[in-house]
Image (cartoon, helix red, strand yellow):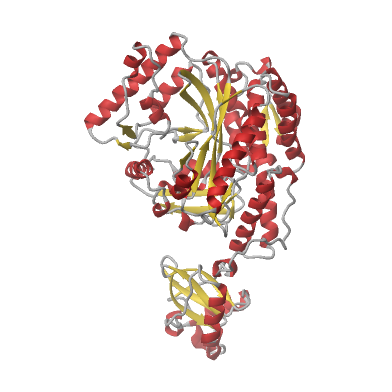
């Protein structure tokens, strides 16, 4: 979706014209491969850094376009969420101190973003999923106001003809219905690109698939979504479901989702990967910038294959084959899309060095890996890593092996060898791969987040814990010290930032409630069992319609009537409520003025929490 000017494929004429250009692009790529025009050397690497923009209170800040204008650098571009931006780093030859060079450029680019952000009361955070994100941040109103995102959302909704059903089960469970693709905006990644010789592409691509699980496990950094502890790398489950445009009946003939690990090894040439994408996945959008690639090639120029790249940009394989043109020369590369952003720049470059080292260090015994490893084991490894991170067990060489043992005894030696073979400097190799080794013995980003969050929850309510967590993520990132060296947050941890205490920081969300037709006897026993003094009365989808207090029930304690009287008869309907975004002092004054010890917290008339004098 790199082109800004896209529109939905609707008319028969538009569809036939676009498909004609797509076929021309496939033919042109075939011709370039046959004529040996695709660049084979030198090998380059590149990366895309996505990041969150937050307020000074570490909540998502919808000012991406404002920041983009202030930064004024062509390396920066938008993402679907108006609280995200992306940096496209320059390609670098894989040799010498290439990783240090990329680290320096990344630091310079982020410093530029931070400088602009500071002038707009904002901060920058690198993390797979921002802890303080909530469902109110992922509405269409927070989508970056650009045509291509609205088009993507419109076509996805049109094809599904139903809401997006998100269900992720981990330690906690999340089930939501959502009406847009904005859930994609919850995810940020550090996407890594490695140029590949076209003659070796299929072999390299299959190897990238084989190693994906163990690589992801050590790099996981996204265990939380909306305050719930889900997968070690929740992005994998969330992104798969957030842009799944298949209807429940699979009438689109797409048995495979657009975000996928794939279903089998690749066995043909690289051109077959692109052909499979076109055959398997419906074309969604078109652009006015499409050209006749075969005519351009005949004229002696190198085509950009705009139609093919536009289609490829709507198929989100975790390892994706990509075509590009740099310096007037065409090349092919593998894009690694599964690595999350953060926790630090240092960690991200270490992840990249590790992945590229293992890619380049494949020993002969793993040649033709598709004949030696069952694809379902490779796929299973990937999803085990997504769920359990470094706690995963992997199938490797026909055996069950722990993440730690596989990394230390197989993958790290392979990575050292691969980087040396590529001519990377010894100082870069040692600097970055030692970070991976230390992470094995200490903790990953996901483990730091989970352990810290659990500690915070022992002394704070959920929303305050998430805000303190995000603030400390930011503080540690500013030092650019690898996450393995971060101290786990204690329950007493706070933040040096001036975060205004709001109702949502201290309110209780584990609420007991009853309905109007329930008996007073039920209310009485729930109050006794749970030691609570106020009982909200709800209707339908959590609409607050009344409240009962312990005092209301006192006259009926010893009466036989209590079992036959409905809640509706005694509940108070003249309600005093408060919004979750109000200041705690305002809640305190409201309770004092009315002589209450608790207040229902509502959003759009729906009960979302209760704040009591004890909470305050």
In this image, 254 relative to 479: left or right? left
Q: Is 597 or 94 nearer to us in this picture?
A: 94
Q: Left or right: 316 with respect to 453?
A: left
Outermost residue toward the top?
35
Please count the marks in the image. 0
**Is 243 above or below relative to 332?**
below
Percent from the top left, x then y, of residue 20?
Answer: 29, 22
Q: Quadrant of the N terminus?
A: top left
Q: Position of residue 612 (x, y in %)?
A: 58, 76
Q: Nearer the viewer, residue 149 or 239?
A: 149
- In this view, the residue in front, 426 or 154, is 426
Name the spot of residue 417 as percent of width and height, x first: 72, 21
For image coordinates 69% across by 63% down, the residue present is: 458
Please state which of residues 516 and 559 is positioned toward the viewer in this rendering. 516
In the rendered image, the vertical position of residue 75 relative to residue 146, given as above or below: above
Residue 576 falls left or right of residue 494: left
In the rendered image, which quarter contains the C terminus? Answer: bottom right
Q: Residue at x 58, y 17 (%)?
A: 42
Query: Quadrant of residue 505 in the image?
Result: bottom right
Vertical comparison of 593 with 169: above or below: below
At 52% across and 45% down in the image, what residue appears? 187
- Whether residue 492 appears in this view of the structure is yes
Question: Residue 374 at x, y = what percent?
Answer: 59, 24
| Residue 279 visible somewhere in the drawing | no
């Amino acid at each position: 979706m790199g082109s800004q000017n896209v529109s939905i494929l609707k008319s028969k004429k538009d569809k036939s014209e676009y498909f004609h250009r797509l076929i021309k692009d496939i033919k042109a790529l075939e011709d370039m491969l046959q004529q040996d025009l695709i660049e084979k050397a030198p090998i380059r690497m590149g990366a895309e850094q996505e990041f969150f923009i937050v307020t000074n209170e570490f909540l998502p800040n919808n000012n991406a376009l404002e920041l983009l204008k202030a930064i004024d650098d062509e390396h920066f571009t938008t993402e679907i969420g108006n609280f995200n931006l992306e940096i496209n780093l320059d390609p670098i030859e894989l040799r010498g101190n290439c990783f240090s060079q990329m680290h320096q450029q990344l630091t310079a680019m982020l410093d530029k973003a931070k400088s602009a952000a500071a002038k707009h009361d904002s901060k920058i955070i690198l993390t797979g999923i921002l802890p303080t994100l909530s469902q109110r941040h992922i509405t269409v109103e927070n989508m970056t106001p650009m045509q291509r995102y609205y088009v993507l959302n419109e076509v996805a909704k049109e094809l599904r003809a139903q809401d997006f059903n998100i269900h992720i089960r981990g330690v906690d469970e999340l089930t939501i219905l959502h009406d847009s693709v904005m859930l994609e905006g919850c995810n940020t990644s550090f996407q890594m690109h490695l140029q590949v010789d076209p003659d070796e592409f299929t072999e390299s691509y299959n190897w990238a698939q084989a190693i994906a699980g163990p690589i992801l496990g050590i790099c996981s950094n996204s265990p939380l979504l909306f305050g719930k502890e889900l997968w070690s790398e929740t992005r994998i489950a969330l992104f798969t479901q957030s842009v799944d445009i298949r209807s429940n009946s699979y009438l689109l003939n797409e048995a495979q989702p657009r975000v996928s690990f794939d279903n089998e090894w690749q066995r043909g040439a690289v051109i077959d990967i692109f052909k499979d994408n076109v055959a398997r996945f419906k074309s969604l959008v078109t652009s006015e910038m499409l050209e006749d690639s075969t005519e351009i090639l005949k004229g002696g120029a190198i085509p950009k294959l705009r139609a093919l790249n536009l289609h490829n940009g709507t198929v989100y394989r975790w390892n994706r084959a990509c075509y590009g043109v740099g310096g007037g020369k065409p090349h092919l590369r593998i894009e690694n899309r599964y690595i999350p952003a953060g926790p630090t720049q240092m960690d991200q470059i270490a992840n990249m060095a590790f992945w590229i080292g293992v890619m380049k260090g494949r020993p002969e015994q793993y040649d033709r890996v598709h004949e030696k490893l069952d694809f379902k084991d490779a796929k299973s490894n990937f999803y085990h890593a997504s769920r359990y991170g470094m706690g995963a067990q992997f199938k490797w060489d026909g055996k069950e092996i722990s993440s730690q043992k596989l990394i230390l005894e197989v993958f790290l030696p392979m990575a050292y060898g691969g980087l040396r073979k590529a001519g990377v400097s010894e100082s870069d190799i040692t600097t970055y791969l030692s970070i991976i080794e230390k992470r094995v013995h200490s903790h990953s980003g996901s483990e730091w987040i989970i352990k810290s969050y659990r500690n915070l929850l022992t002394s704070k309510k959920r929303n305050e814990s998430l805000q303190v967590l995000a603030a400390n993520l930011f503080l540690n990132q500013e030092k650019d010290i690898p996450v393995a060296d971060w101290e786990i947050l204690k329950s007493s941890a706070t933040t040096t930032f001036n975060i205004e205490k709001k109702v949502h920081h201290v309110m209780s969300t584990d609420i007991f409630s009853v309905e109007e037709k329930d008996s007073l006897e039920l209310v009485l026993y729930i109050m006794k069992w749970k030691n609570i003094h106020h009982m909200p009365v709800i209707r339908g989808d959590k609409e607050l319609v009344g409240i009962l207090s312990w005092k209301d029930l006192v006259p009926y304690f010893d009466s036989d009537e209590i079992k036959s009287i409905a809640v509706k008869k005694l509940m108070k309907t003249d309600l005093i409520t408060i919004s979750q975004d109000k200041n705690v002092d305002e809640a305190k004054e409201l309770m004092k003025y009315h002589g209450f010890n608790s207040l229902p917290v509502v959003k759009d008339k729906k009960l979302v929490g209760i704040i009591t004098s004890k909470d305050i």
